[in-house]
Image (spheres, grey):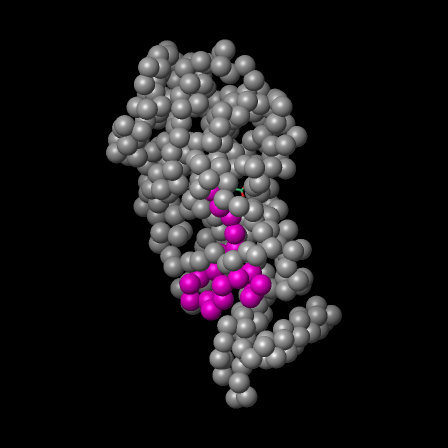
Amino acid sequence: MSKYLTRLGLLTSLSVILVAAGCGADDDGEDTGDGEAASEYAEEMDYTVTGIDPGAGIMEAAEQALEDYDNLDDWTLQSSSETAMIAEMEEALENEEPIVITGWDPHWKFVDHDLKYLDDPEGSFGEPEDIDTLAREGLQDDHPEAYEILENFEWTADDMAEIMYDLVVEGTDEFEAGQDWIDENEDTVNSWTEGVDEVDGETFEIVHGPWETDLSTVGMMVPVLEDMGYDVELTNVEANYMYSAVADGDVDAMISAWLPNTHGAYYDPIEDDVENLGANMDGEAALGLVVPEYMDIDSIEDL
Ligand code: PBE
């Protein structure tokens, strides 16, 4: 009951402000502007941002947004998984209902659906960042060939999105999708492996997170390393364990470190215990709140 009252209170004060600003509903209740529509959305969405797994860095950024924006005071962030979030989003799209999700780039969802990021004037989601490659200490001595390939590894958001699209939308196995990309991008892959000696069945371990971005990346890198003679083992864990696994030397490398913001809380404490081989994707990783295009709002402040 009290929750209901709070919401009602919020709605009322919002409408008052919006009507005062001349952008609310007119007398017969017809929607004449963004503002009134926004408050209706909020109630329809049950004041909920639909999120993913609780360990993901984007969930921390979304919690930060709930703190930074006064209009989100009574909102909650619902955790689930990437798959569950996308399913909810697709259902909303089908019914043209409002929904707000935690969204990021690169991601295939922007290819197939008309979606938009909401402006983030408070900067809760930070600036676009890099995806870095991290190596365990001693990797260069133990596996110099793989070390060199990983040091050379560099691609773009479009590259990753191609594999992700294949994987998620076409249902292709990640290694097949990765191999298809390799076949179409031989020059790029050669620029990573040129002059590097092949090895004879050495085991190489990569840790990655539970998201499609990570699957797409390893889906490509595993065939590259296998082609060079490695026997690659993958471990799929939650975000914080990716970092401790490399820092503790339990695995050889990770190639999906979203830095400096998204995984900053995981990276900063172990920074001195790993070797950062630099960005494999430069400034193209971005986070935010995402809504369908048909929603008549542009900013988190309009929610
Ligand atoms: N993501 C995709 C992850 C990193 C890769 C943005 C969902 C996150 O930790 O938020």
User: Residue at 51% across / 16% down in the picture?
Assistant: 139
Q: Nearer the viewer, residue 43 or 171?
A: 43
User: Residue at 58% across / 63% down in the picture?
Assistant: 301
Residue at the extreme right: 2
- Image quadrant holding the N terminus, namely bottom right
User: Residue at 53% across / 25% down in the picture?
Assistant: 276
Q: In the rendered view, does 158 fall on the left or right side of 240?
A: left
Give the quarter of the image for residue 264: top right
Relative to 294, residue 101 above or below: above
Magenta-span inclusion, residue 81 = no
User: Residue at 40% across / 30% down in the picture?
Assistant: 154
Q: In the rendered view, does 105 fall on the left or right side of 13?
A: left
Q: Which residues are magenta?
A: 285-303
Residue at the extreme bottom: 28
Q: Position of residue 98 (x, y in %)?
A: 49, 66
- Image quadrant holding the C terminus, namely bottom right
